[in-house]
Amino acid sequence: MRVVFVHGACVRDGSWWWHRTGELLAERGVASESPALPSCGETGGPTGAGGPGLAEDVAAVRHVLTANDEPTVVVAHSYGGIVTAEAAAGIDAVHHLLLVSSYLPEVGQSLSSFGGEEPAPFLDIDPEAGTFTVRPDALAETFLQDCDPEIQRRAADKTARQSLAVLEQPVEAAAWRHVPSTYLVCAQDRGTPAQLQREYARRAGSIVELDAGHHPFLSQPAAVSELILVRSGLS
């Protein structure tokens, strides 16, 4: 069994965001990896107007998921749920989806389908450049308030400007309709409030709540790794 972690919006180096949980899984003999998302500039190309968007992110994740037929749990975080909905569709090796403070879009829905009329106050949007990111002064307070100061400091160097195109581009498949799924509600999340997560979670097969912020795989890695092992039948 392996785990593929699909990170959220406006960050890079998914393996770093995942490292605390990944290390615990490795101790149990479970390998994990985190595909690079082109829309976040992780593959070396430009982001912004005319740059890569959702389709390229989907292709990157799908390439990893189809690389072998080993039974796979996909852990999709936040925007990663948009990517995973399409990327994991129709792949027999994908046995379970764990959606962390995430989205479960229907076919034709996009990331913007889950937003309000006004942009979130923690975002820095540059329409001319065609990119957006998290405001540096809002990162720790909004998304990492339950993480230790060292993680907060290092995370500040792991953000990215992402293509605005991903906000409006719709998914063409909904893997959660056909693959067993668990939604992990992060009850102390200040980025995606818990009441919204509970609404999104109604589409999942089962729901688990954790008293954690937006990145529980950093703040409570033992709880997240154990949940993965349970859902994969290894614990």
Image (tube, rainbow, N blue to C red):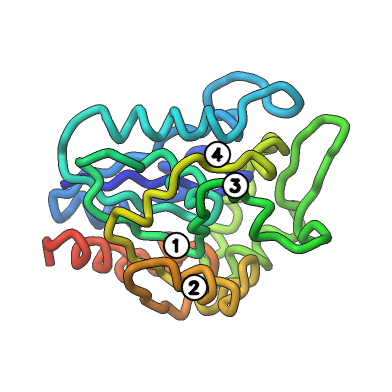
Disc 4, disc 3: CB below 8 Å? no
For numbered disc 3, what is the local secondary structure? loop
Of 30 and 156, which appears nearest the observer?
30
Amino acid type indicated by mark 3:
Ala
Amino acid type indicated by mark 1:
Val
Which residue is situated farthest in the right direction here?
128
Could you tell me which residue is drawn at 22 percent across and 51 percent down? 95
Q: Earlier in the sequence, mark 3 or mark 1?
A: 3
Inter-mark Cα distance, 4 to 3: 9 Å
Amino acid type indicated by mark 4:
Arg
Q: Residue 120's spot in the image, x, y percent?
A: 77, 60
Inter-mark Cα distance, 4 to 2: 21 Å
Which residue is situated farthest in the top direction here?
45
Q: Which numbered circle lies on residue 186?
A: 2
For numbered disc 4, what is the local secondary structure? loop
Of 77 and 142, which appears nearest the observer?
77
- Reading the image, the residue beneath label 1 is 100
Query: Image quarter for residue 16?
Result: top left
Amino acid type indicated by mark 2:
Cys
- Reading the image, the residue beneath label 4 is 12
Could you tell me which residue is drawn at 69 percent across and 37 percent down? 161
Inter-mark Cα distance, 2 to 1: 7 Å
- With 31 as the anchor, is 123 left or right in this view? right
Inter-mark Cα distance, 4 to 1: 17 Å
